[in-house]
């Protein structure tokens, strides 16, 4: 990753522009951590970059940023710019390009994100980033109150970095977050969700949760159930406990999954029936939330006589043929009872046993229908 990144810097510099790796990648590199992508800052404008990287993605060129994929790695190349005025605490209304790296670094969120590396791998540290990385402290580049006013997303980014990097927030940053939290009301719910997802999926989630509480953000983030949250290896488990299905954006699949996890919790994820009706994944998440070992759930799952309808050794044609009846609502009633009986080990999953059992069920259903008809007639 580093070599590919340095080659990109060389390529830009061969075209007589400056370029540096900036922010996350260098910060993580110094900490011996892996990064997912690389941010590059340059004085080349998007119109210049298009000549160097004709295959780059220019969708965000208007905001001074182009994306290049090389060797499967994502590079976000952004032109030096100064802090513009912001329309809505988030989007700059104009992007003002500048020619000086230091001016670009000053518009960034936190000092630890201003660290750079040049094409020879040398660290360039114009704003004391290295000492803040060493001291594991998050400080804003400008005054935190001004910084959060310019972009309220930085409030959540501060908590996210403190959580994922296991850094502390400086006292000034904490104080400013307490005073500026109302700005989060105007931040798009998608951006909030993106940052919270990173906090909740971190192994260090406890730190994020305690910062949200300590800084008084529970109400503005609608996280009323936060005290019920326990660390969960699956972020969807955390959202399930928070019960904010109507507040934050989720896909249909996620909404269904959260419902199934809740039902699994209610119905005991260690029962054959729960595992059958809600499936293994929701039950393992439910199990984790209840403190049940995944292995225990897997053992129960492996003992199940059936895992899905098609595992049952008779089909609807067998039923219709054996009972000599036409298809109708009674068939789905029979199927439900047969499934349940197999799962409760009341009948073995064997063709002749199942057909005999179906005959008995069918007779009982008919008898009880006759009884209720007679009762109706009598009344
Ligand atoms: P990671 O990639 O691990 O999430 P990162 O530090 O690389 O962390 P990105 O979101 O990729 O963060 O942003 C790249 C860089 O752009 C940051 O390091 C920071 O310098 C700057 N940056 C990103 N978002 C903001 C923001 N809201 N305000 C100011 N600067 C920002
Ligand atoms: Mg990054």
Image (spheres, rainbow, N blue to C red):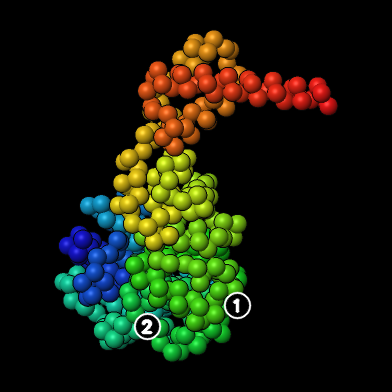
Residue 244 x, y percent position in the rendering: 56, 60
Residue positioned 54% across, 10% down in the render? 324
Q: Badge 1 local density, few (<14 within 10 Å), some, or many (20+)? A: some
Residue 368 x, y percent position in the rendering: 65, 25
Residue bearing the label numbered 1: 182
Residue 82 appears in the picture as rendered: no
Q: Is 280 drawn above or below residue 132 in the view shown?
A: above
SS assignment at label 1? helix
Quote the CA–CA distance across marks 2 and 1: 22 Å
Residue that sits furthest to the bottom in the current view: 171
Q: Is 32 drawn above or below residue 176 in the view shown?
A: above
Q: Nearer the viewer, mark 2 or mark 1?
A: 2
Q: Is 227 drawn above or below residue 238 in the view shown?
A: below
Residue positioned 69% across, 20% down in the render? 370
Please indicate whether residue 317 sits to the left or right of residue 130 in the image.
right
Q: Badge 2 local density, few (<14 within 10 Å), some, or many (20+)? A: many
**Residue situated in front as seen by the camera: 121 or 186:** 186
Q: The C terminus appears in which quarter of the rendering?
A: top right
Residue 163 appears in the picture as rendered: yes
Q: Earlier in the sequence, mark 2 or mark 1?
A: 2
Residue positioned 59% across, 73% down in the render? 219
Q: Residue 44 is drawn in which quadrant?
A: bottom left
Q: Is 11 drawn above or below residue 337 in the view shown?
A: below
Residue 69 x, y percent position in the rendering: 29, 53
Residue bearing the label numbered 2: 168
């Amino acid at each position: 990753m580093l070599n590919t990144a340095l080659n990109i810097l060389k390529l830009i510099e061969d075209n007589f522009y400056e370029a540096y790796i900036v922010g996350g990648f260098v910060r993580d590199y110094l900490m011996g951590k892996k990064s997912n992508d690389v941010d590059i800052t340059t004085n080349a404008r998007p119109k210049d970059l298009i000549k160097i990287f004709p295959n780059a993605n220019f969708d965000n060129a208007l905001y001074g940023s182009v994306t290049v994929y090389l060797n499967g790695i994502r590079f976000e190349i952004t032109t030096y710019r100064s802090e513009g005025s912001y329309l809505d605490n988030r989007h700059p209304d104009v992007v003002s390009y500048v020619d000086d790296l230091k001016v670009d670094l000053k518009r960034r969120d936190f000092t630890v994100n201003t660290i750079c590396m040049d094409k020879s791998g040398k660290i360039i540290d114009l704003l004391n980033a290295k000492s803040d990385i060493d001291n594991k402290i998050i400080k804003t580049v400008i005054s935190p109150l001004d910084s959060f006013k310019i972009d309220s997303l930085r409030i959540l980014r501060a908590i996210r970095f403190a959580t994922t990097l296991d850094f502390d927030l400086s006292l000034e940053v904490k104080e400013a977050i307490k005073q500026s939290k109302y700005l989060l009301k105007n931040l798009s719910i998608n951006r909030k969700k993106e940052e919270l997802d990173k906090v909740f999926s971190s192994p260090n989630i406890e730190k994020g949760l305690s910062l949200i509480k300590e800084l008084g953000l529970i109400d503005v983030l609608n996280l009323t159930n936060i005290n019920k949250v326990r660390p969960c290896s699956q972020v969807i488990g955390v959202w399930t406990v928070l019960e904010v299905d109507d507040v934050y954006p989720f896909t249909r699949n996620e909404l269904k999954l959260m419902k199934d996890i809740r039902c699994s919790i209610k119905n005991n994820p260690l029962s054959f029936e729960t595992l059958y009706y809600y499936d293994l994944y929701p039950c393992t998440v439910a199990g984790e939330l209840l403190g049940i070992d995944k292995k225990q759930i897997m053992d129960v799952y492996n003992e199940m006589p059936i895992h899905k309808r098609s595992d049952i050794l008779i089909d609807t044609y067998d039923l219709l043929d054996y009972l000599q009846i036409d298809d109708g609502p009674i068939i789905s009633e029979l199927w439900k009872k047969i499934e349940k009986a197999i799962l409760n080990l009341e009948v073995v999953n064997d063709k002749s046993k199942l057909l005999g059992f179906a005959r008995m069920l069918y007779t009982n259903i008919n008898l009880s229908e006759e009884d209720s008809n007679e009762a109706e007639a009598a009344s």
